[in-house]
Image (cartoon, rainbow, N blue to C red):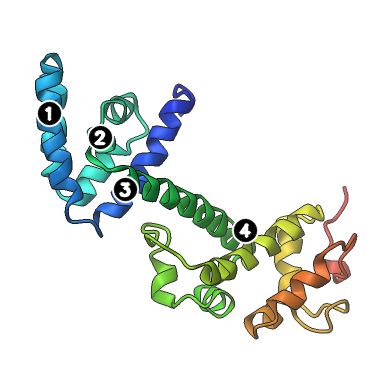
Amino acid sequence: MSSFNLSEQKALVFHQAVLGLTRNNSELIPHTLNELNKLRDRKPEQADLWNRWSALLDAPFEKMSEIILADTPDGGLLRANSPFMDAMSKTERNLIWQHIGFLQFVRYYLEAVDDLALELPEQAAITGFSLEELAVLKTQVPADISAERLDGLKQVISLQKMLFGLNLDQKVRRNWLRHESETLKGVPLSLMVDGKAAYVLESLTGVAQLTVRPEDMPRMG
């Protein structure tokens, strides 16, 4: 998306969040259609664009999302002339920006579990989320997440950031997590699964070098 400027990037993130909330807000689409009619009156010269939006708002959710979120000049044009913003109250817009924060947080989490190759059962044990909730995180972020539940995701993010900050490559990060650590007196991943994530993270704080097996260390040359 190199041709998009910052405001267009914000518009993309905004619409990702809006579309994520339409499943739980049955009034949003009707309100947006009403706003679209007002736009027709205010800007009749853009009738073709409003017709496209009207068709999108009547389309199945998956098709609507695919077109509106397309990383293309056409997708950018639709987002730049979107009826969604004016269709929402200030409170609703604040909820959207809150949801955007959740989206970013979940994105960090998904990157962390991918980097560490954590399986869903392992994630569930560490975070307290159910397998079903974790399975849909890639495509659907909850409209609200309690601070306690955010802490569960944050533990995984913090673990990955700490290991990455120690300049260990991905293979070493994954191997260290799954083998006995002299420092921790146990297998780090097993400790986290058993509810001792805080202990693992505290032990990593300020550590300059982890105890790993020689065969886990990156080879030079």
Residue situated furthest top in the rendering: 45
The span from disc 1 to disc 3 (Cα, nearest Å) is 19 Å
Q: Nearer the viewer, mark 4 or mark 1?
A: 1
Q: Label 4: state its secondary structure.
A: helix
Task: Please give the residue where the numbered disc 2 appears in the rendered image.
Answer: 86
Q: Nearer the viewer, mark 4 or mark 3?
A: 3
C-beta proximity under 8 Å, tags 4 and 1: no
Residue 40 location, quadrant: top left
Residue 152 left/right relative to 199: left
Residue 125 left/right relative to 215: left
> Looking at the image, is mark 1 or mark 2 earlier in the sequence?
1
Task: Please give the residue where the numbered disc 3 appears in the rendered image.
Answer: 92
Residue 2 left/right relative to 93: right
Task: Please give the residue where the numbered disc 1 appears in the rendered image.
Answer: 38
Q: State the residue at coordinates (37%, 47%).
A: 96
The amino acid sitting under disc 2 is Asp
C-beta proximity under 8 Å, tags 1 and 2: yes
The amino acid sitting under disc 1 is Lys
Task: Please give the residue where the numbered disc 4 appears in the rendered image.
Answer: 115
Q: Label 2: state its secondary structure.
A: helix
Q: Position of residue 62 (x, y in %)?
A: 23, 50
Q: Position of residue 29 (x, y in %)?
A: 17, 46
The span from disc 4 to disc 3 (Cα, nearest Å) is 35 Å
> Looking at the image, is mark 1 or mark 3 earlier in the sequence?
1
Q: Position of residue 81 (x, y in %)?
A: 26, 26
Q: State the residue at coordinates (82%, 57%).
A: 218
The span from disc 1 to disc 2 (Cα, nearest Å) is 10 Å
Q: State the residue at coordinates (84%, 84%).
A: 185
